[in-house]
């Protein structure tokens, strides 16, 4: 199940996780963000080693700025605290799964 993340718990939930974490930088008013959300849920349900961390850029300004996020949706895939891939924009499920498979 996706976890809401902010600057307060980003390190614990994303960087210190043993799982592959997809940091989903989104906005509630973003239509492409709403389209990609169910895809991320499917990916998380299909693979127990993947977690989704949702960061609302309208609430948390610090984390997106730190990671150079300038548009939403932006997905940053982390493994053991290290950025392994970045996807900007609403994409098909296969683009995300291929990025995960490549790490």
Image (spheres, rainbow, N blue to C red):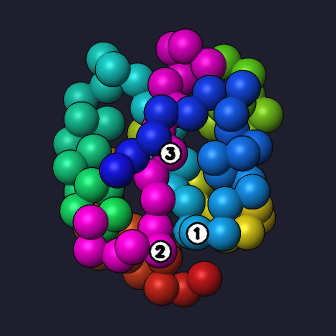
Q: Is residue 68 above or below residue 91?
A: above
Q: Is residue 48 above or below residue 51?
A: below
Distance between mark 1 and mark 2 Cα atoms: 5 Å
Q: Is residue 34 above or below residue 83?
A: above
Which residue is denoted by mark 1 in the rendering? 19
* Residue 46 falls within the magenta-colored stretch: yes
Residue drawn 55% across the image and 13% down it? 59
Distance between mark 3 and mark 2 Cα atoms: 13 Å
Q: Quadrant of residue 21?
A: bottom right
- Image disc number at residue 49: 2
Q: Position of residue 31 (x, y in %)?
A: 24, 29
Q: Position of residue 51 (x, y in %)?
A: 46, 59
In the visual, does 54 lie left or right of 43?
Answer: right
Residue drawn 62% across the image and 27% down it? 6
Q: Quadrant of residue 40?
A: bottom left
In the visual, does 56 lie left or right of 77?
Answer: left
Q: Is residue 70 visible to us here?
A: no
Residue drawn 79% across the image and 34% down it? 66
* Front tag of 3 and 2: 2
Which residue is denoted by mark 3 in the rendering? 53
Q: Which residues are magenta?
A: 45-60
Q: Secondary structure at mark 2?
A: loop
Q: Secondary structure at mark 1?
A: loop
Q: Earlier in the sequence, mark 1 or mark 2?
A: 1
Q: Residues within 10 Å of mark 3 (few under 14, many from 20)?
A: many
Q: Residue furthest bottom?
A: 102
Distance between mark 3 and mark 1 Cα atoms: 11 Å
Q: Position of residue 19 (x, y in %)?
A: 58, 69
Tell whether label 2 touches label 1 (CB within 8 Å): yes
Q: Is residue 77 visible to us here?
A: yes
Q: Earlier in the sequence, mark 3 or mark 1?
A: 1
């Amino acid at each position: 199940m996706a976890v809401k993340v902010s600057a307060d718990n980003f390190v614990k939930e994303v960087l210190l996780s043993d799982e592959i974490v997809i940091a989903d930088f989104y906005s509630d008013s973003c239509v492409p963000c709403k389209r990609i959300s169910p895809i991320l849920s499917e990916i998380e349900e299909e693979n127990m080693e993947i977690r989704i961390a949702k960061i609302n850029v309208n609430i948390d300004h610090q984390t997106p700025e730190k990671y150079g996020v300038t548009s939403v949706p932006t997905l940053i895939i982390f493994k053991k605290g290290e950025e392994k891939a970045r996807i900007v924009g609403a994409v098909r499920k296969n683009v995300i799964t291929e990025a995960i498979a490549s790490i």
